[in-house]
Image (spheres, coloured by chain):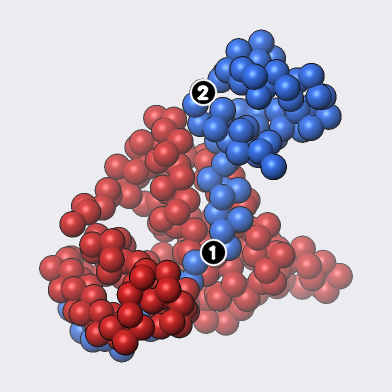
Amino acid sequence: MPVAETDAQLVARCRSGDDDAWRELVDRFSRYVYAIAVQAFRLSEADAEDVFQEVFARAYQNLSKLRDDAAIRPWLAQLTRRLCLDTIRAGAREQPGEIPEPSGVDDTIATLDESLYVHEALATLPSNCREILDRFFARDESYRNIGDALDLPAGTIASRISRCLVKLRAELEGRNPVPAESGG
Amino acid sequence: MRNYDEETLAVLLRTLPAAPVAWVKAAQEIPLARRGLDDIVERARADQAFREALFANAESTLEGAGYEPDPALLDAVRERLTP
């Protein structure tokens, strides 16, 4: 079973100039940054793409300024949040007054934090479970597509998903509680 | 501790869909971009001699053009220029 590198270890490798580590960092947090932009702030795809690229460009540029390597997740959340708000404000320049954050941003980000926690646990499962759960839940693929892609009979997909969810639950139950939310 | 029943797990897994592949790839290439990937590709597209030299011997061509020819940059240049 793969042992996931901690966020702090990954950030330390990035800071040492390891391109593979940077690719892995982007991979680890891409869903999170994307979801904050489109779910919490409801940005258009075009605006979300701009924010997404800017977040990672600034993160790369300023990684050396991060005081606590383990705090990369809340740091990225805060950076994404600020850039989303800047985008909304720039789009509403003609309107007088302060533009507030959309309602429910804190709650949405708290849910995304928990979801990321579950995805991190997923990353430690055997590759067959990672693949099938990700395809079914996160990529919304049909049993038929999953069966074709993984060369499995479609009739066995549901039971495999169920077994992998049991493994995921066991992994989560063996972990520490969900980390504090990034909101605020 | 939170009870992660199947329904909760399903909801939480669905909450984080994958970001578009092209966005992720572009973000992953930021270190390469900082080292001149975009400039190299642009020059190769505009300058046939440079492009041919790159395909013939990427490492020495990049070195001669003033870039640090590290393996990741070489791979990315080849990938971008391969039709």
Callout 2: chain: B
Q: Which mark is residue B70?
A: 2
Measure how far apart labels 2 and 1 are at the Cα level: 28 Å
Q: Which chain is blue?
A: B
Q: Dot 1: what SS?
A: loop
Q: Residue at x 49, y 58 (%)?
A: A30
Answer with left or right where residue B30 lies relative to residue A167. Answer: right
Q: Is residue A130 left or right of residue A18?
A: left
A92 versus A33 height, above or below:
below
Labels in figure, total = 2
Name the residue at 55% across, 75% down.
A40
Between A61 and A119, the residue placed more toward the observer is A119
Out of A58 and B67, give the one closest to the viewer.
B67
Question: Is residue B2 visible in the rendered structure shown here?
Answer: no
Q: Colour of chain A?
A: red
Q: Position of residue A177 (x, y in %)?
A: 21, 69
- Looking at the image, tell me whether mark 2 or mark 1 is earlier in sequence order: 1
Left or right, A38 with respect to A147, comes to right
| Residue at horizontal 60 percent and vertical 48 percent from the top | B26
Q: Amino acid at mark 2?
A: Asp
Q: Eyeballing the image, is A115 above or below B62? A: below
Name the mark on residue A122.
none
Of badges 2 and 1, nearer the viewer stands: 2
Asked which secondary structure carries label 2, the reply is loop
Which quadrant would residue B5 be assigned to in this image? bottom left
According to the picture, the residue beneath numbered tag 1 turns out to be B19
Chain assignment, label 1: B
